[in-house]
Image (tube, helix red, strand yellow):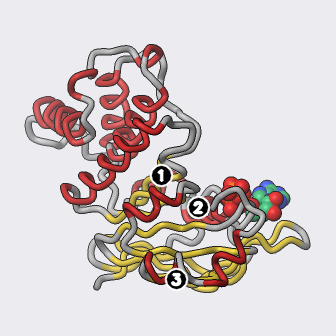
């Protein structure tokens, strides 16, 4: 297996509090890895470190780029995104006044401009439109491509957000609570979408999620954080039956 994302002794202190406690992890190419843990375990802080939103107190982060692991420890968020690490947020961040296709177009053009090779692309307009249509199709949004986002359901908006995150052609896609706020039908649809994307895209997925049925359905591997440190790491059937994991969740509404 090829490692696409790696952390070594990654640590974040907020004053006396250690939110992420020397986390060393290697994420394998093509896997869906779920990072779970009780409330306050450090999942969001870990994501914020990976994406350059927060600076680590100590430790290092590498991302595979052009066949090599590149050090992205001190890279700001836009450089991390350009290097191929994309993130979809818990809170929807689509442009409400634009249609679904227009939102995807903005994200795609912004990515092309960041890569600074937009004008040099042969037949760029056609290539751009083809890329947009492919993204819409991959995420099942073609049928509502001309719908303005302010009229979409919560689940549809979350799917648009996934399309926007995919517009940067990520090698690693971090999904932050993809089912948060969804009804059961929407949850089933998003699980099916994640599984299809995993099959159809050459990307690696890292997912934080509180819904354990979803975690069980999608994960190749589960990493459990508790008090900022890795408590368990392995195949879903092993991790979810691990007594230490059950104990860590006792009193938490997550399990
Ligand atoms: N900016 C901050 N300043 C101080 N403490 C913080 C800050 N951000 C997070 N923390 C603390 O760090 C710890 C880890 O928080 P974090 O949000 O990463 O956990 P989490 O696993 O994402 O929780 P949840 O599942 O509830 O979202 C918590 O004790 C939290 O209060």
Q: Quadrant of the C terminus?
A: bottom right
- Is label 3 in a helix, a strand or a loop? strand
- Is label 1 in a helix, a strand or a loop? strand
Residue 87: mark: 1
Considering only order in the chain, which callout, 3 or 2, is on the residue closer to the N terminus?
Answer: 2
Please state the horizontal and vertical placement of residue 97, each as a whole percent of the image: 46, 14
Looking at the image, which residue is at 37% across and 75% down?
A: 4
Spatial distance from mark 2 to mark 3, Cα to Cα?
17 Å
Spatial distance from mark 2 to mark 1, Cα to Cα?
9 Å
Location of residue 220 with respect to 105 vertically, above or below: below
Image quadrant where residue 250 sits: bottom right
Considering only order in the chain, which callout, 1 or 2, is on the residue closer to the N terminus?
Answer: 2
Please state the horizontal and vertical placement of residue 228, each as a whole percent of the image: 71, 74
* Disc 2: residue Cβ within 8 A of ligand 1's nearest atom: yes
- Disc 2 vs disc 3: Cβ atoms closer than 8 Å? no
- Disc 2 vs disc 1: Cβ atoms closer than 8 Å? yes
Image position of 68 (left or right of 37):
left
Residue that carries the numbered disc 3 in the rendered image: 233
Pair 2/3: label in front = 3
Residue 47: mark: 2
């Amino acid at each position: 297996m090829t490692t696409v994302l790696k952390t070594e002794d990654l640590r974040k202190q907020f004053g006396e509090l250690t939110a992420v406690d020397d986390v060393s992890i290697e994420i394998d190419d093509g896997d869906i890895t779920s990072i779970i843990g009780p409330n306050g375990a450090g999942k969001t802080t870990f994501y914020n470190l990976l994406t350059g939103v927060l600076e680590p107190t100590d430790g290092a982060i590498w991302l595979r780029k052009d066949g090599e692991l590149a050090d992205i420890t001190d890279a700001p968020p836009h450089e991390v995104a350009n290097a191929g690490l994309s993130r979809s947020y818990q809170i929807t961040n689509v442009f409400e006044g634009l249609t679904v296709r227009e939102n995807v177009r903005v994200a795609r053009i912004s990515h092309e401009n960041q890569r600074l090779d937009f004008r040099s692309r042969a037949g760029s307009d056609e290539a751009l439109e083809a890329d947009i249509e492919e993204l819409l199709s991959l995420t099942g949004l073609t049928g509502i491509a001309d719908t303005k986002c302010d009229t979409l359901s919560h689940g549809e908006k979350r799917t648009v957000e996934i399309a926007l995150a995919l517009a940067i052609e990520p090698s690693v896609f971090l999904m932050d609570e993809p089912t948060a706020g969804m009804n059961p039908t929407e949850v089933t649809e998003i699980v099916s979408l994640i599984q299809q994307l995993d099959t159809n895209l050459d990307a690696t997925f890292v997912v934080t999620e509180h819904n354990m049925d979803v975690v069980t359905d999608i994960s190749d591997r589960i990493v459990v954080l508790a008090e900022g440190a890795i408590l368990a790491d392995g195949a879903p059937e092993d991790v979810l039956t691990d007594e230490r994991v059950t104990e860590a969740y006792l009193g938490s509404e997550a399990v």
